[in-house]
């Protein structure tokens, strides 16, 4: 991950879901479908970030699913002030944060996914991850501008995958984009690669809604993900 993971904009709007404990993890939940569920693996701003919650609301309605947005940072909150204060962003020790919240989080993430089927009775479960959450979701199916993803993880994917790929991304590099598009089609999996010219890392969850190009990119990404979920969960 890099400092680009701390850039972006906070959206206006009031999330309409609820908070509850799910598998002993604080979780934002939107929607009421009893058969189809979506789990969102958040970016560095975590489960309380309004943008992530507003996306959960959209997916609940547009994909007709119950959407879960758990806290995978064990209560640690990265201040949204980073988005507005470059000095705070510069002082933030990103690598120390990743050291506390690395890929050893996956058992918690996969445990939540299993619980959606085994304990809450959902027949189908989809997942989407943004930035930090992308590496985990590669193993679950569907992602947007992932960080800390490796070629080995790409080659090991066993589930249908959608990638929302911005043109400018220091994490999902041109080399990794090329590797995805060469490797995943050979795995006999459903694969949807959506390329977003002019967009930068973080656009699908932290776009500037006052910028027409970013707003259109965000809307296209949100619609593509919602359609992906709707057609596979029903």
Image (cartoon, rainbow, N blue to C red):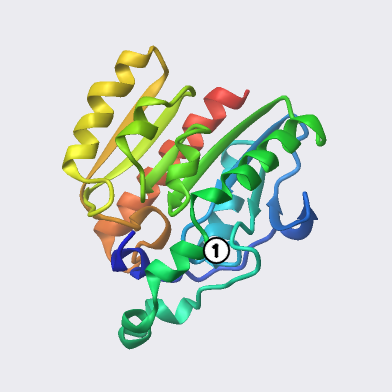
**Vertical placement of 44 versus 83: above or below?**
above
SS for callout 1 = loop
Query: Relative to the observer, which residue lies in front, 68 or 75?
Result: 75
Q: Residue 35 in the image: state x and y as whole percent.
A: 74, 29
Whether 148 is drawn above or below 12: the answer is above
Q: Position of residue 131 (x, y in %)?
A: 40, 53
Q: Nearer the viewer, residue 28 or 222?
A: 28
Residue at the spot x=73%, y=36% of the render?
116
Q: Nearer the viewer, residue 27 or 222?
A: 27
Horizontal and vertical percent position of residue 177 = 23, 36
Residue 145 left/right relative to 130: left
Can residue 65 be seen by looking at this rendering? no
Placement of the N terminus among the 4 image quadrants: bottom left
The crowd level at tag 1 (other Cα within 10 Å; few <14, some 14-19, many 20+) is many
The quadrant of the picture occupied by the C terminus is: top right
Q: Is residue 87 above or below residue 78?
A: below
Q: Position of residue 155 (x, y in %)?
A: 35, 26
Q: Is residue 133 left or right of residue 89?
A: right
Residue found 72% across the figure and 24% down from its top: 123
The residue located at (41%, 26%) in the rendering is 156
Tell me: 65 left or right of 32: left
Number of numbered discs on residues: 1
- Residue denoted by label 1: 46
Q: Is residue 105 visible?
A: yes
Horizontal side of 5 relative to 99 (left or right) equals left
Q: Can you say whether 79 is above or below 29 in the image? A: below
């Amino acid at each position: 991950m890099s400092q680009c993971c701390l850039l972006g904009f906070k959206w206006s709007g009031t999330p309409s879901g609820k908070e509850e404990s799910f598998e002993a993890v604080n979780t934002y939940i939107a929607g009421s479908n009893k058969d189809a569920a979506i789990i969102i693996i958040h970016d560095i701003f975590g489960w309380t970030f309004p943008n992530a919650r507003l996306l959960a609301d959209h997916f609940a309605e547009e994909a007709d699913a119950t959407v879960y947005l758990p806290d995978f940072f064990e209560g640690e909150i990265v201040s949204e002030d980073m988005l507005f204060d470059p000095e705070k962003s510069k002082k933030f020790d990103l690598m120390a944060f990743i050291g506390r919240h690395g890929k050893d989080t996956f058992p918690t993430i996969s445990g939540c996914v299993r619980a959606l089927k085994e304990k809450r009775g959902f027949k189908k479960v989809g997942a989407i991850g943004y930035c930090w959450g992308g590496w985990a979701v590669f193993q679950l199916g569907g992602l947007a501008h992932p960080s800390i993803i490796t070629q080995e993880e790409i080659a090991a994917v066993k589930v249908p995958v959608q990638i929302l790929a911005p043109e400018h991304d220091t994490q999902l590099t041109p080399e990794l984009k090329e590797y995805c598009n060469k490797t995943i089609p050979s795995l006999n999996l459903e694969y949807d690669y959506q390329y977003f010219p002019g967009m930068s890392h973080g656009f699908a969850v932290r776009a500037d809604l006052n910028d027409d190009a970013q707003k259109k990119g965000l809307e296209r990404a949100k619609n593509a993900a919602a359609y992906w979920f709707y057609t596979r969960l029903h």
